[in-house]
Image (cartoon, coloured by chain):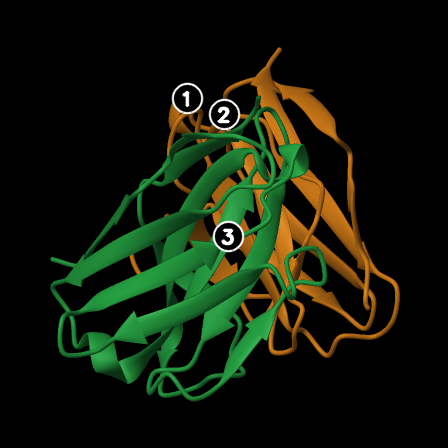
Chain colours: A green, B orange
Amino acid sequence: QVQLVESGGGVVQPGRSLRLSCAASGFTFSSYAIHWVRQAPGKGLEWVAVISYDGINKYYADSVKGRFTISRDNSKNRLSLQMNSLRGDDTAVYYCARDRQLYDFWSGLPGFWGQGTMVTVSS
Amino acid sequence: DIQMTQSPSTLSASVGDRVTITCRASQSISSWVAWYQQKPGKAPKLLIYKASILESGVPSRFSGSGSGTEYTLSISSLQPDDFATYYCQLYNSYPCTFGQGTELEIK
């Protein structure tokens, strides 16, 4: 079955970096765009970034643009999120989510979600 | 960017009730609306997309409607498993935006 497993979360000081990973299985990873969506404690959902099925196209929320970088390795069925210059308001559960549509970068529809990994930015 | 305003933020209801949640967009979005259900400590689950298309496996008591700037999620007869938080989402463009969420609680 479709499975997305996030890892790499933890406690990090403001200004430092952290790299999240998402391991995918149960589907053809190279056929789908993948999103990162986050949720601050007790708050709603915030879309963060997306990468196209082939890794060529990327889009970021203004709140993370220039600080976060999304990438993928289709040979390893793995997605990454490099987070630099972390701030307190980056504290959240980070979910990776597979788009619902095949080969459609502009779909923007996270159809299947992992269970998330918690990132806490604190001194 | 297009804003999505969801209401109410909290809704109290009983098992068997019919409930409706509304999402208003700051401009017309041509039915590019999805609805998600999230339970505490769990990932969101896609319920409906393109305003009214039920995702596979979602019970038929869930329905979506709307056009232009106003969209609704309805649950026809609440079941105990339905008490959760619901989010609307604008998609088919970036940044894709979520509504603030509606917590559906037991009266």
Marks 2 and 3 share the same chain: no
Residue A71, how many percent across, how many down? Answer: 38, 71
Residue B59, how many percent across, how many down? Answer: 37, 48
Between A74 and A14, the one nearer to me in the picture: A14
Query: Alpha-carbon distance for marks 2 and 3?
Result: 23 Å
Q: Which residue is tagged 3?
A: A37
Q: For this view, does B9 lie left or right of residue B16?
A: right
Disc 1 is placed on an element classified as helix
Between B13 and A48, the one nearer to me in the picture: A48
How packed mark 3 is, by other alpha carbons closer than 10 Å (few <14, some 14-19, many 20 or more), is: many
Q: Which residue is tagged 2?
A: B83
Chain assignment, label 3: A
For image coordinates 70% across by 42% down, the residue present is B21
Contact flag, marks 1 and 2 (Cβ < 8 Å)? yes
Q: Which mark is residue B80?
A: 1
Under mark 3, the amino acid is Val
Q: Quadrant of residue B68?
A: bottom right
Disc 3 is placed on an element classified as strand
Work out whether residue B17 can be spotted: yes
Q: Nearer the viewer, mark 1 or mark 3?
A: 3
Under mark 1, the amino acid is Pro
Residue B65, how many percent across, how many down? Answer: 66, 62
Chain assignment, label 1: B
How packed mark 1 is, by other alpha carbons closer than 10 Å (few <14, some 14-19, many 20 or more), is: few
